[in-house]
Amino acid sequence: MNNKEMTARRRYVASRKPLGKSANENTSERVQHSKRRRPWGGVLSPATFRACSVLTVAVVIGVLWNWFDESLDPVVHRFLKQICTAADDAVFCHPSLTPSRRTQRATKRIKTGEVILVVARHLQLWDLDALRDPFIRNELLTARLTNGDALPNSAFLAAHLAYKRKLAIQQNSDFNPILRNYLTDVLPSYDDYAAFHPILWPEDELDSALGPYSSTFSHVMMFRRLVHDEYDAFTRVSTEFNQLIDRSEYLTARLNVLTRSFGTGPLPVTASGSEQPSQLTTSEIALYQNVGGLTLEHGSHAMVPVLDLYDHHASPNVGFSYDADRECFVISAIASIAPGFEVMDSYGKRTDSDLFARYGFVNGDGSEWTQASIALWHSVHASGSSQGLSKETSRILRYLQYDDGYQACIDPFQDDEAAWNFKKWKFAYLMSIAGKENHWVAQMSPRDKDSKPGRSTNGPITLEPPPDAHLDGDLQFNGNLLFGTCRLISLTHRDYNGNATRMIQDALRSESSVDGETFVLLPTNDALEYRTQMCIARFASTALSRFNTTLEEQRRLVGRLNREAFGTRKWTVEHIRLGEMQTLEMLKQVAFSALRKTFGENGVDNARRSDDPAFQMRDRPCHPDLLRPLLT
């Protein structure tokens, strides 16, 4: 829907305490009152007086509640007033929107189709602006990651953001007052992010909470390595940047871009002429490509004030687009917004794991996709680089420790040469896909696609844990590559009419096949499919066992945290764990359902009764010494 890398707003929950005296002082006051005559000459009965008192207290509390709600973030509220009343009409804010916490809510019903916000180009910050900045272009454009890859465009926007913020603080920037306040006061600080964003959590805390082979843990670590590598790349090519911007300042800016930027969509290109704010020239496209290895063919990343305050839900009430002709972002209601409800955007189709890794939150209502990994022994993201892959080699080898489909474990010193030779080719192909997430990670559709956002994100949408998915529902799951991985692991040299070795060799010689785009091992016979589905069930069951709890216990825990600890790190992590567990459980059900379709209602037992070695599934792995020759 969009390529937004938008904000991870913290779910602020106000602590509302009554104003007044201490408990002891109030007790003393009540004692004193008990000695006095009833006020107003006894006109009111005790019951009536108590009722009036309760009503008065309720009114006062209501006023204070609203006052606190409007004052939770005075900086943001002042900024909204400043930008929405700008004299140059650079921004349009719907009159029925009012500040609420760090966002906006409707005071009157806003109808579908109404424009609620317009933000002009000169109040936005783009990666295109960054690449045109003399400091960025002269100091940083040649930066590369350690493996020689180009940095993402968004890294240059982050460097630009950190640089401009430094100038704004020093009062040396020519930014207009709105952008100055946006940079120095409105955007979250390092301490803000450290309180909730997993990229800044201690690694041992993440490891303890999620486990090192959790799909979510791997996702967070990928982003963490990337943002640190970007800073290192910039400091390698620019001493001035290193002296001006420290690591925490860059990480803060990078998280602001990761969590709060928007995609513009493709930009117009001119053959010549001066640089315009919202269009590219062919000469600068060539410059960015040749010097920085960058491309802007899909558009820019843009920081857009006010728009970046809106929270996310899979069922939003607004949508946004960039109007290239008017050079502005336009946000419109795509559903009616009732009075009291906050504006809700969508950050695109995401899994809960991706929301957490990028933005630092989950909604906890089952409205997002979920994911889980069958990579039991290696880190998928660490295997994405040649350096990381070399460290993972011995772990990747463990996937070949069962020798399913053979009557006995393959012995490199005694078995026939064909079986051992095939195992070497199979290991080589397994290494080639070890760092490709779609070969190891299952993504499944929302557990509750009908869930809608609440009035506000400062409380749980529902107190119930997300429901389990069901095979008889409208489950969406594309497992071709995932099942292809288990099909590869379960493959014998006799499969595909004895052509399995040649198929793997041909696939390895084809670069596009190694990228996982064209080569997929397809079903060929019942025995291989039995082994494939049992491999999926085996890996999913093993992954589930690592959570050290049952699904039912995890559901109860999440339900309790919904009531007692909404928005805390514990609440967030346990929702992530529940989603991964439910995905793995569903993966098992998908595998067993496929077996029932092929072998009948008692599919596993029926297949196991076969005397054919091709149906052999080992309960225990082969001796590790039989694998070690593959490492030489």
Image (spheres, rainbow, N blue to C red):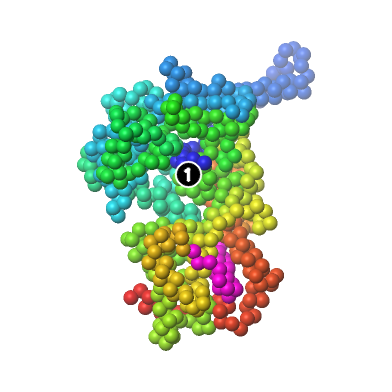
* Residue 83 vs residue 43, the one in the foreground: 83
* Residue 15 vs residue 40, the one in the foreground: 15
Q: In the image, is residue 541 part of the stretch drawn in magenta?
A: yes
Q: Is residue 356 left or right of residue 276?
A: right
Q: Position of residue 207 (x, y in %)?
A: 45, 56
For this orientation, the residue located farthest to the top is 41
Element type at mark 1:
loop
What is the span of residues highlighted in magenta in the rendered image? Answer: 520-548
Classify the position of the C terminus by image quarter. bottom left
Q: Which residue is mark 1?
A: 360
Residue drawn 44% across the image and 75% down it: 501
Q: Position of residue 302 (x, y in %)?
A: 41, 35
* Residue 380 vs residue 594, the one in the foreground: 594
Residue drawn 40% across the image and 46% down it: 200
Q: In the image, is residue 13 part of the stretch drawn in magenta?
A: no
Residue drawn 50% across the image and 50% down it: 353
Quick check: 364 above or below 52? Answer: below
Q: Is residue 279 left or right of residue 516?
A: left
Crowd tier of the residue under label 1, counting other residues whose Cα lies within 10 Å: few below 14, some 14–19, many 20 or above: many
Q: Position of residue 545 (x, y in %)?
A: 55, 64
Can residue 403 be seen at all in this image of the molecule? no
Which kind of residue does numbered mark 1 sit on?
Gly
Magenta-highlighted stretch: main secondary structure? helix
Q: Position of residue 210 (x, y in %)?
A: 49, 55
